[in-house]
Image (tube, helix red, strand yellow):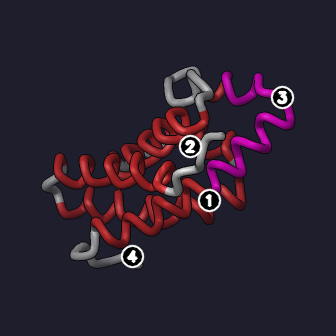
Amino acid sequence: METFDPRTLAKPVYESLRQLRAQTRDQEKLKEQKNQAVELYTYLSTWGLLRLKAEEDALSQDGKKQVVKEFFSCLEEISGQKGIANSNGLDRLMGLGVEEYLGLTGLGLALAQEFGFWAMAIYHDIKGGE
């Protein structure tokens, strides 16, 4: 029997946000990244995965867009649902069965909570919009 490792959700989120933070010097983008990561859970619980994925292309702020892309990359990695992080991800989500989509949404909500937690830890020195 395989044991569940509670770090399964935390590790990819921590690594993604840490890399984003390290690659970004612009304070405004750092604020956007932090705020988007913290707001993911609220957005996802209100609007769902389809709208979040559609929003990825519509976002004009690079910092926010980067976080949404990282969210879907982490979700793809953890869930094993190939293709949801790429540019055709919306079509992939639309093609899922009801149970798969609802399960993926539940996993996405748990992942969004991790993003919110790790954003506060990794971007602890970035002020504004909290």
Q: Position of residue 74 (x, y in %)?
A: 47, 41
Q: Gap in Å between the C-alphas at discs 2 and 3?
A: 22 Å
Comparing 91 with 117, the one in front is 117
Q: Are marks 1 and 4 in contact (CB under 8 Å)?
A: no
> Which residue: 75% across, 27% down?
94
Comparing 104 with 59, the one in front is 104
Secondary element at image label 3: loop
- Seen in the picture, residue 39 relative to 66 is either above or below; the reply is below
Residue 43's label in the rendered image is: 1
Give the residues in magenta.
92-109
Counting residues from the start of the chain, the first of labels 2 and 4 encountered is 2
Q: Quadrant of the C terminus?
A: bottom left
> Which residue: 13% across, 55% down?
25
Q: Are marks 2 and 4 in contact (CB under 8 Å)?
A: no
- Seen in the picture, residue 64 relative to 124 is either above or below; the reply is above
Amino acid, disc 3: Gly
| Number of marks | 4
Q: Gap in Å between the C-alphas at discs 1 and 4?
A: 16 Å
In the rendered image, which quarter is residue 109 located in? bottom right
